[in-house]
Every structure is written in structure tokens, then in C-alpha cells.
Amino acid sequence: MTVDVSYDARTGAAVEEVAVSTPFEVDTALAAAAAAAPGVAATPPVERARLLRALADALEGRADELVALADRETGLGEERLRMEIGRAAGQLRYHADVAVEGSYLDVTIDTGAPRLARTGVPLGPVAVFGASNFPFLFGVLGTDTAAALAAGCPVVVKANPAQPVLSARLRLLAADVLPAGWFALVSGFEAGGALVASPHTAAVAFTGSQRGGLALWRLANERDVVIPVFAEMGTVNPVVVTAAALSRADELARGFVESFTRGTGQYCTKPGLLFVPAGSGMAGRVAAALVDLAPEAWLLTEQIAASAATGLAELVAAGGTVAGQAPGPGNGWTTPTTVLSAPIEKLRSGSRLLEECFGPVAIVTEYADRAELEHALGELQGTLAAAVMAGEDDQDVPWLVERLTALAGRVTVGDWPTGVAVTGAQHHGGPWPATTRPATTSVGAGALSRFTRPVAYQNVPDAALPPPLRAGNPWRLPRRVDGVVTLP
Amino acid sequence: MTVDVSYDARTGAAVEEVAVSTPFEVDTALAAAAAAAPGVAATPPVERARLLRALADALEGRADELVALADRETGLGEERLRMEIGRAAGQLRYHADVAVEGSYLDVTIDTGAPRLARTGVPLGPVAVFGASNFPFLFGVLGTDTAAALAAGCPVVVKANPAQPVLSARLRLLAADVLPAGWFALVSGFEAGGALVASPHTAAVAFTGSQRGGLALWRLANERDVVIPVFAEMGTVNPVVVTAAALSRADELARGFVESFTRGTGQYCTKPGLLFVPAGSGMAGRVAAALVDLAPEAWLLTEQIAASAATGLAELVAAGGTVAGQAPGPGNGWTTPTTVLSAPIEKLRSGSRLLEECFGPVAIVTEYADRAELEHALGELQGTLAAAVMAGEDDQDVPWLVERLTALAGRVTVGDWPTGVAVTGAQHHGGPWPATTRPATTSVGAGALSRFTRPVAYQNVPDAALPPPLRAGNPWRLPRRVDGVVTLP
């Protein structure tokens, strides 16, 4: 395949072709990134930040054009995409601020004998595999690209084949702003493998399916010099409704539908499994809410639409029963919005019911008592997020939060898991297989340190130290000196 | 094999047999650790610290007996082992202090909407594979055990087969101090595999050879739920002598011999490769120093002695020439202390000359100019430490430090790499294959966070939050609140 085809998600029509990268082009991009890496690393954070802010300005300045391209390729709708582009610009500025603030380097100096001083050093070129479901926030100029650049690493992005035209346009936008070697975009399936295998590549960041992420992780593990793969993958994100929450059962049913159908169910934080007290009739309430609320919406690609249909059939085969359904649009890539009910005893480790079904599909299951609920929670896989919907002063909240902590990277009470705020305390990660590196986050301030590696300098003279460790603190970083945090 | 045999390293005589763990015993130990894990995690840091300090006291209180056992099994000598036991006790107290201080949890609270609060949570049972070369600092109660307990994780240690009697004695000592389930020791080759494969195990910490560490890493990667393996492995630790340093060539030659023969060359930080200016005659000086300084010393095991002999032969086959040699003792497990010279053009990626030879063996190589040196440094593998021996205001130091940063986890100027201080700024790690997780350290304050995973709590009521995040800050931790570090 020498072209990526750009489709209109709403009609399924092929509207444009974009040539994929040749092996020579991929090699050239990687060599340029490797050559640029020392210079990118040595660029002071204030200058990296200036470039990231310029990228943010460029995104916003071209919003009309970018939203139109993205809407055609994704079918996600102008309103959502315009909001997303604003958040993506905000994220670029946020990572700029995090880079300048500098805590992510964890600079530590012990002045005793031996004198030891440690800082994070940038890893080098990062291969970024963006997601199709957030073309701006997790795409070509999304969180991984922003975090890697902020941390002082050049980036080579593998274009998502679902958005070849948008990706190419974002590449031009980046090329206008960034110095040579800081950024490249390559495309085509072979290019992805070449990026992971290249000795120039120092780390891989991926957002997408478990199958895709684990394939890259396996490939990286076969290298002579194994490199980290930060793969953030789709999960089930269970939500538990307590007995005390049932006083607002209809509100919860509507909230559940709104959450699991957001972005046509194509969120990695979609609540895919709702635990409700037995006899609450919640599956019926959710089915009723579907009729009102299910949006007319498209899936991102033909393959995702096909997988959603297959997934739904697999869920039924595994013991689920369709409780309610709203038809998709009659054209383009679509699937019915569906809520299933499943008996809790079918939720056993290894069951298809406990794996993500990407798209507007969710499951409701009833628990008779705490013991049954606890048992079922013990069967779940690691997940990005988990939520509790509770009543006032609900005595079930503490034990549920503790139980869900073992499963998830983020636990929410009262909030649906869908939204992921870009802040310092955010953790968008979670136990295997939610990510290949459960100790890391792809969103928020913590996203930068993934692309650095600590190095300790022992009795190294000041002039030979990297800037973060020099006596004059030229980058004005917070530093822990003999155990005490000192601000610049 | 149902027993581990305890040998006298100085005579090679089998002196005692210790039965290895049965599969039932291994399962029982893991189940007990898993059952204890929530309680260990919930134990306040001050109480964890009290237990670690009690372990330190017990080590020192039993020093005479422990040193005698260790000396027989290791041949490392009473003086060294007595010093090591003191440092191991200090390390336990250090990790106790780090746990109480609490920065390692990186507690971060954002009070906006949504309210997000993040802390590290303990991973659960940690399988520790200690090293034979530091029976106290990296052994049964060494840095990995201390760090895991300090971080709130139960530990199951796989006894190093080189020290079955010492390991069993240390197990008793730990059992006297620690509550049930916090600590177990298992032994036997099969037990090691069972630890890594068990669903109860949450992480693996290993110190030892590349072969051993990578075998565990591969095993962990085959699990359904892949877990992190923190393997710290032996490396070459190159040292560069600059032209300006040659005014003290004889002092450097003696220092090199003292450093590479320390612990009979069985340090993971042994300087295995010395780059010297062409025509400096350094190989001859080192050979001369050997005659004076090479200690009468034993290797840890029969297998290590055999590997050292094989390694020496391999180095010669790869292009090395023996420049000087001092015979080992006439009895027990021993190998000649040897310095080789090798032409720098033989130092090519993949050559045996660039791999560790565990034992009192090191290589000297001459570089004609900076270009030749830079080229050779580019061929090296990732390494734990690297050093520069320089003159006053030496203009070669800055570029060498920058170049070695790309290779190493720690760069020293003027100090031999052998010593590893236990401090906040320490980084005992390094690029692949120095460790399987180059972003982590097995020594110093950074060792604890390996055994935690961040979890973010969104709008969770105070009573349901873990102690580090509660409004009252009951564990008295430093916390970053809305971007500002606040002390308790």
C-alpha cells in the first residue's frame, strides 16, 4: 500500500489519497531527529516553551480549516472538534509552563562527599503514535508530542491512517513553527515498524488499542537496545452505582448514556460496564434514556465500525443481552448505540464481557450484595479509570474507592470517568493492560518525565555540568539541595 | 536439585546443605505476602521506619555471627564484610528516613474543578533477587528489600544460591523483627521462576548478571499481567584518562588497580575499560602496580571462577593481550588478577571486549586523539557508571562528561566509579542493558518509588481518600497543592 486513503466518515466515500512515506523518507526523518537531539536537549526551557506556544497559536489560528478537515475524516462534528482544538492548544501551553517550571526534572543536589547532583536528561528522538479518536488532543500535535518537545526531545510522529489529510496539514503547520529536526511526520504501516526498530529512536509513545500498543511493545522488546514503550490503551472503566445512589436512578441512567456515547463511544475512558444493585431496573432506564439521548453519530473508520459490530456479537455470545438500542445513521460508518445487560456471574476473568468494545456499546450488570460485587470487581482487568456513583455520606464509598484503587489509574466519585483534566495531579494511566507502564501518565504534568532519564554527576566541575545543575541555576529550576527544596 | 550447598570459598569444600523450598512453601509465602499487602500498605511510614530500624539494629547486633557466615561463603574477608554490614544497617535506616520524609510519593493536589489528588500507592508483593557480591548491601536485607518495605510492599526474597546458610540466617533475623506476611525467603531455581510467574507478585527487583536479569525480564513479559522487572546488571564502566591527567600516571595506575580489584573485581561498578592517551605506557604501569597491589582474594563461587577464566580467554580471542598478571591463591575459587591491553580499533559494537568480565580483569586501550576516542565511546553499551580522570582546569572534561552522559547513569570526575553513595541524588541505573528500567535507581532515595504506582482521585470525599491525601495530612507528607510545595 503506497497511499493512505482519506474517507468521509459520514458517507464512507474515498475523497483523497496521500502518498505514504518511503523507507528513505523514514530514515531521513530519523537521522534528522537524531542529529537535532543534542541541540533540542540543550535548548533552554523558555525557548522550548516559546515554540510550543507558537504551535498553540498556529492551531487556533487555523482552527476553521483544521476543524473542517478533521470533521470530514472523523465525523466527530464541528462543535466537538472546535472545543478539542482549543483544549489541544491549551495543552501545548500547559506543557510549555511545566517545562519552564521544571519540577519534572527532579533536580537533586547533595553537597557532601562525594558531591552528587542529579537531573533528568532528555532521552532523544521519541516516536509518537497518535490516536484517531482525539485528532488534536492525542494526535499529531497532541499530548505525547507536546510533552516530548517540552522535555527536550525531537519527535517523529507516525500519522494515524484514519486521518491522512489532517495529519499532513498538521505537519505543515508544525514545520512552519519548529526548527529543522525537531519534528517530522511519517506515514504507512511499514514506517511504524521502522520507527520502533530504528537505533535512533529512544522511546515510543502510543495511544490506541491494546492490540496496537502491545504489538509495538513486543517489537521494542526485540531490539538489541530495548527502549520504553509508553502505550496507553483502551479499557472498560467500570462504574459502580451504590444502593444509596438509586434515589437518582433516572438521572444516572441519562448520565451514563451521555458518557458512554460521547465521541460515539470512542473514548479510552468510556464507562463500558455499569454495576447496579439488583432490582434497580437500571438496564431498562438506560434503554429508555437511549431513545432520547443517543446522538446521530459516526464512527472514525470502516474498520472501527466493523469491529464494533463484531464486538457486539461477541458480547452477546459471551452472555450479554441487548436491553436497548438506537439505530445509527443510515450512511457512512456507523453502528447502533447499544446497551446490554449481563448476569454478573458471567463476568469472569478472560470473558469478552470484561474487554473494551470500542464504540457506543455498554453493559449493565446487577449485583445482589457487597460480596457478589467484590468478587466481580476482582475479575476485572486493569483500567484507566473507575467511578462510584454514590449517595450522601454513603458508607459504601470508602471500601469501593479502596477496591477500585487496585484496578485503576484514576478513581472518581460522582463524576463519570470520561473527562481527563490536564493538571498536575492528573494520572492517565493504570495497571496492565491499561498501559504498558502503569507508573506513567500520558496526560498532565507527569507526562514530561517519561521522556527523560536521571543521570547523577559525581564531583563534576561546574562548567562541565548540564545547565540544571550549575551553581548559577541558569534555567531557574526548583532544586532539592541537601534534602531541602529551594526555589529559584 | 533439592538442596543448596554451602561452600567455603577459600577451600572449595562443601560444608553444609540447606533444603530448597518446595512448591508448596513458595505458594504459601506468596499467598501470605498477598494477604498481608493491604495491611503493609496501610501501615503508617513511621511504623514501617521503626521496623526497618529494628532490622538495622538486629544486623549490627548479630554482626559477629553474620560476618563469619558470610566470610566463609563469600571469601570477601572480615574487614570488608564488617564494613558492609554497617553500611547495610545504615541503608535500612536511610530508607526508613526516606519513607517518613515522604517526597517519594509525589503527593499532588489540585483543588479546582474537578478536584484531583494523586499519590503513589504501594504495588503489592515484591520478589527480590539479591546479588551474591554484596551479601548485605544487595542481599536478603539489602537495598531492594529495604526500599520495598519502606514503600509499603511485602517482600519475598529468592535466596542467592551462593549464600544458602547466610540467607537462612538472615531470614530468621527478619522473622524476629517483622510482622507475619511482610517478609519471606524462598530458595531453589524453580522458586525463582515461580515468584516471577505468580499472580501475587506485583514487581521484581534483581541485582546480578545480564543473563540472569534478562531471563527474569523475559519471563515477566510472558505473563498475562506483565509486571515491572527492575534488573540492575553488570556493565563495563569505562574510565577515560585525559592527556592532562598523565602528570600523575603512576597514581592513576595504582588507583585503577585498587578499584578494579576491589571485592575481587566483583563490583557491578568495576572500571573494566581504561582509555588512555597513546604512548602513555599506562598498560605497563598498571601491570607493575598489579605486582604490588593485587590482593590475595577469592571469587564468590565455582561458577564465577570458571566464568572469569572463560571470560579472560574470550577477551584474548577478541584481540586483547595480557599485559600483566598476578596469580590468585592456590586454593578455593580463584582466578589470576589480569590487566589486558587491546587496540582501540578492536572495540567495536558486539565485541566481547565491550562486555563485562566479572572478576579481577580489566582492559587498557590507547587512543590517538579525540576523534578516535569519541568513535570508540560511540561503540560502547549502556553502563551504570563512567569516569573521567583529568588534570586541573582540563578542557577535555566538559565534552567528555557530555559524551559519557549518553552512556551512563552516573558520571564521575576524579573518582573511580566503584563506590555508590546512598543519598538523595544518587542514580544507580543506566541505559539498557545496564538496567531494564533506565529511569529507575536501585540505590538512594529514588529506590522507593519503583514500588509504587500513582493513582489520581477525582472528587473523592476526604474519608475515602488514602492517608497521604486526607485534609489532615496524617502522615505529615510534603504535598504540592495547586502547584506549590507545602511542608507538613
Image (cartoon, coloured by chain):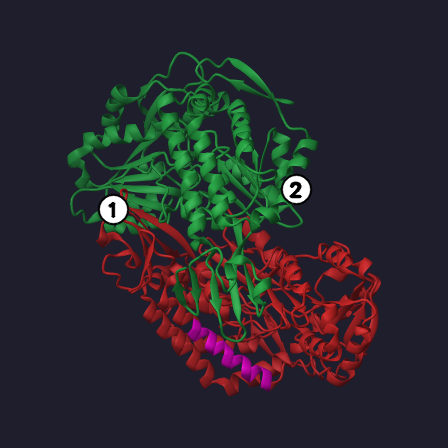
Chain colours: A red, B green
| Comes first in the chain, label 1 or label 2 | 2
Please tell me how crowded label 1 is: few (under 14), some (14-19), or many (20+) other residues with Cα within 10 Å. Answer: few
| Secondary structure of the residue carrying numbered label 1 | helix
Q: Which residues are magenta?
A: A79-94
Coordinates of residue B291 in the picture (x, y in percent): 26, 19
Decide whether residue A92 is among the magenta residues. yes
Measured along the vertical axis of the image, is residue A313 above or below residue A93? above
Coordinates of residue A354 in the picture (x, y in percent): 73, 60
Compared across the picture, whether B336 is left or right of B452 comes to left
Residue type at mark 2?
Ser
Coordinates of residue A288 in the picture (x, y in percent): 80, 81
Q: Quadrant of residue A459?
A: top left
Q: Quadrant of residue A209?
A: bottom right
Decide whether residue A246 is among the magenta residues. no
Please tell me how crowded label 2 is: few (under 14), some (14-19), or many (20+) other residues with Cα within 10 Å. Answer: some
Closer to the camera in the image, A4 or A352: A352
Closer to the camera in the image, A415 or A19: A415
Q: Main secondary structure of the magenta part?
A: helix
Coordinates of residue B271 in the picture (x, y in percent): 34, 35
Distance (Cα) linking label 1 and label 2: 51 Å
Could you confirm whether marks 1 and 2 are on the same chain?
yes
Q: Which mark is residue B192?
A: none
Residue under mark 2: which chain is it in?
Answer: B
Question: Who's the residue at 42% across and 18% down the image?
Answer: B334
Quadrant location, the N terminus of chain B: top right
Q: Is residue A114 visible?
A: yes
Q: Which mark is residue B370?
A: 1
Residue with the mark numbered 2: B198
Measured along the vertical axis of the image, is residue A24 above or below residue B387? below
